[in-house]
Amino acid sequence: MVDTDLVEYNPTIADIPRDDRPRERLLYYGSSALSNAELLAVILRVGGVGQNAVRLAESILARFEGLSGLARAGVADLVEVKGVGTAKVAQIKAALELGRRLMLTAPDQRAQIRSPADAANLLMLDMSTLEQEQLRVILLDTRNRVLTIATIYIGSLNTSTIRVGELFREAIRRNSAAVIVAHNHPSGDPTPSPEDVVITRQIVKAGQLLDIDVLDHVVIGQGKYVSLKERGLGFDSQ
């Protein structure tokens, strides 16, 4: 005889009342009414052996410690999860990339930067999850609307590896009126280093010579940022 106390009940999506299924709830109540696991379940569509899509989504989020960890996870990490194959990995990665691209748009399809927080929010979702340092430049028009975001360097950043001319090359090509420099600290702590201040000072001086305003240098950490302009670091010569 089976001890029913030891049997785990794992209903399929079909076993869940129609009004409680993630896809139906999204269509009826809107996406904001769903939990992260339910939204991920909609993307996954089906679960794995012995678990429905919601349970699979919950196990994925638990394994990678939430959405930020999921965004950092590579393909090899994701396919190790039971019930997740390459097709589901592609669906997850595509959804995350769409979310990242959405952050770059505005009603007129170009975001406008009015504060350091605007610049940080534009980059935070992507750059706070990177395992390597990257230096990016937000190129702006005369109304501080984003023209594009260029990745200039990947890897350890220091004064000997960064060539200021490369940093401004795309800005000159796109006839940018201003730029905002940003890089991430994979440690999660956005506190600027002495080298960050030195690099900022060099970039600001080069911008003055090229008649391109350097509005800020933002350091991205895990869910937080530091504006060197707000702290007066590297911008003392302006």
Image: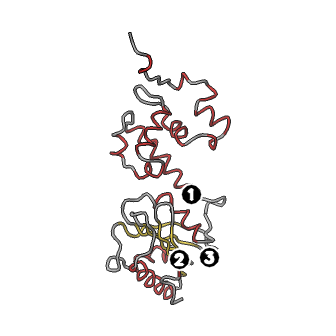
Classify the position of the C terminus by image quarter.
Answer: bottom right
Residue 142 tag number: 3
Helix, strand or loop under label 2: strand
**Image point (49%, 88%), residue name:** 209
- Identify residue for label 1: 103
CA gap, disc 1 and disc 2 = 19 Å
Residue 49 tag number: none
Q: Amino acid at mark 3?
A: Thr
Above or below, comparing residue 98 to residue 49 in the picture: below
Q: How many other residues sit within 10 Å of disc 3, few (<14), some (14-19) or many (≥20)?
A: few
CA gap, disc 1 and disc 3 = 21 Å
The mark nearer the N terminus, 3 or 2, is 3
Q: How many other residues sit within 10 Å of disc 2, few (<14), some (14-19) or many (≥20)?
A: many
**Image point (41%, 25%), residue name:** 50
In front: 58, or 4? 4
Residue 96: x, y in percent?
A: 49, 49
**Image point (60%, 40%), residue name:** 34
Residue 220: x, y in percent?
A: 47, 66
Query: Looking at the rendering, which quadrant does residue 156 occupy?
Result: bottom left
Q: Amino acid at mark 1?
A: Met
- Identify residue for label 2: 216
